[in-house]
Amino acid sequence: MSEYQYPANDILFSLSSVAQMQRLIPYLDDAIDKDLLEAILGEAGKLAEHVIAPINGSGDKEGSRVESGEVYEAKGFKEAFKAYSEGGWIGLSGDPQYGGQGLPSYIATAVNEGVQAANLAFSLCPLLSLGAIEAISLHASDELKNQYLPKMLAGEWAGTMNLTESAAGSDLAAIASKAIPDGDVFRIKGQKIFITWGDHQMSDNIIHLVLARLPNAPEGVKGISLFIVPKFILDEKGEPSQRNDVQVVSVEHKMGIHASPTCVMSFGDQEGAVGYLVGQENEGIKAMFTMMNNARQGVGLQGLAISERAYQQALSYAKERKQGMKADRSGRAVIIEHPDVLRMLMTMKSQIDAMRSLVYVAAVENDLSHFATGEQKQESIERTALYTPIVKGWITEQAQEVTSLAIQVHGGMGFIEETGIAQHARDARILPIYEGTNGIQAIDLIGRKLHSDKGKAMTSLLAEIEAELTEWEQSKISDHTAPVKAILEQAKLATQYCLSSMQVNPVLGTGLAYSYMMLMGYLIGAWLQLRALHASKQDENNLDDAQQRSWSQSVSFYCDHVLPRAVAHFQSIERGQSSIDDLDESSFNR
């Protein structure tokens, strides 16, 4: 099993030359210079490579366990979480008023790529904590912020999301958990399932954010409120003291991410769990979507991260494994000399390059939505909303292919658990399901993001892509500009088809959503690949000949072998509405 290497140079290039992080300079009090960023990423790389990555395989084998109502994580995880917390990593982009460092979130994204690639199961705990921090920061009262944020930003307390119930999966309108007013607090009663890191021993307290209904609340999502429910109720000094009425019922046995305890949580088996209202009554969905959108981009990042980890391992194996003869019959060949293995490796690499570009473009846009002012702020809010389902949906779909190809490169040894490569595919399989399935992401894109503003935000994005493609076409940086422009024209037509279908019937129109999401993912990936190629040729990036050649080959391969998939999705949109409309239960004869 190869050791993980944090790709600091690729991340720096993506941030500076593709995501253009310098766009934030006018809005920041203190600009983040390259030396500071390199120093931060250098330390993040050491943490990922030397502390978190070594417990990935062992954690997968050991998993977690429940003893006397407490969940115990795999060996080494508590120590790794302590190192992560004491390094100040969770508070990188947090509010300085509560102990955060106030850095742009793209830096936290770059750090988290390494943490997630090193150990996906471990990384889910801080990911959920960051989502909880964001929701509390934006929606809770000052009193609750002062009580909870300093400890959470310090990593002393962890956070969770408690949405799903056995009768209410993605359908949050069906949530049945209750919140009964009791003086200044609420008593929470109900059961939640699939709660990632719902219990553990890595932090002194766990701050659950729980969706529940108040008495006489309206039906559906309009009657859901959000509550802070700590594992331990705080004493007068703000320290954990009395155990709250929150219990772990069980830990799920899963296909992957074995070291991440996925818990069934019971609230209020006795007197009712003490909870504190976050935001306004019956507006819990608004607050929870703050967490969800944060987590959705985070899950897209996980798709990139696990793909990078699998690719590194496959590349290392391909350079060492001998199989067959060299082309000139002069001796045995390492398998990276075989054209089909080269094809698989570049299929992985070219998609990872495109995925990384999209992740960091979206991260910088998200920062602009917070830091910018005036027209730029509103544009960035709209663009971030548009990117989010594509980041989550398209990237996690690509991760399925990349981790599967990593097994294929290993041949029969890839199917053997001892090589460790199968773990990445098992771990990655949850990503298209997490934080709203990819079908939901596609419906979000075609419904909330496209239909709701009549295509305004998407038209703006397509116009930006077209303007850059035209500029590069004139400068003749690549022979692939014209094919990308051809896909762009198909994307414009697909946008109109989808808008028309949604106007006729918003329910049936969503049958086109998945193809539309994938089409846009492949197009945006190609656009950003060409932007990277253009940037790689600029002197200020100081890329040597080998690095420039690598980028050039990645872009060429992507445009020749990956981008054509967009055509199939366009044809599904162009021709396939009626065959979707005709489907019903009687279409399946078993």
Image (cartoon, rainbow, N blue to C red):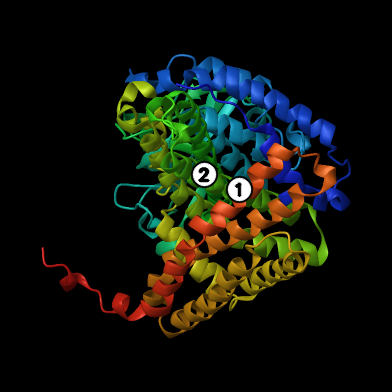
- Report crowding for label 2: few under 14, some 14 to 19, many 20 or more residues within 10 A (C-alpha): many
Give the percent coordinates (x, y) of residue 379: 72, 65
Quarter-of-image position of residue 158: top right
Q: Which residue is mark 1?
A: 553
Task: Report which quarter residue 417 is drawn in.
Answer: top left
Residue 357 image offset from top left, x and y in percent = 64, 49
In the displayed structure image, the side of residue 494 where residue 427 appears, left or right: left
Q: Is residue 318 above or below residue 446?
A: above
Pointers 1 and 2 in contact (CB under 8 A)? yes
Q: Identify which residue, 5 or 444, lies in the foreground.
A: 5
Task: Give the Cα distance between marks 1 and 2.
Answer: 9 Å
Residue at 78% over, 34% down? 37
Amino acid under disc 2: Met
Q: Which residue is mark 2?
A: 346
- Residue 265 can be seen in this image: no
Q: In the rendered view of the protein, which quadrant contains the C terminus?
A: bottom left
Is residue 520 in view?
yes
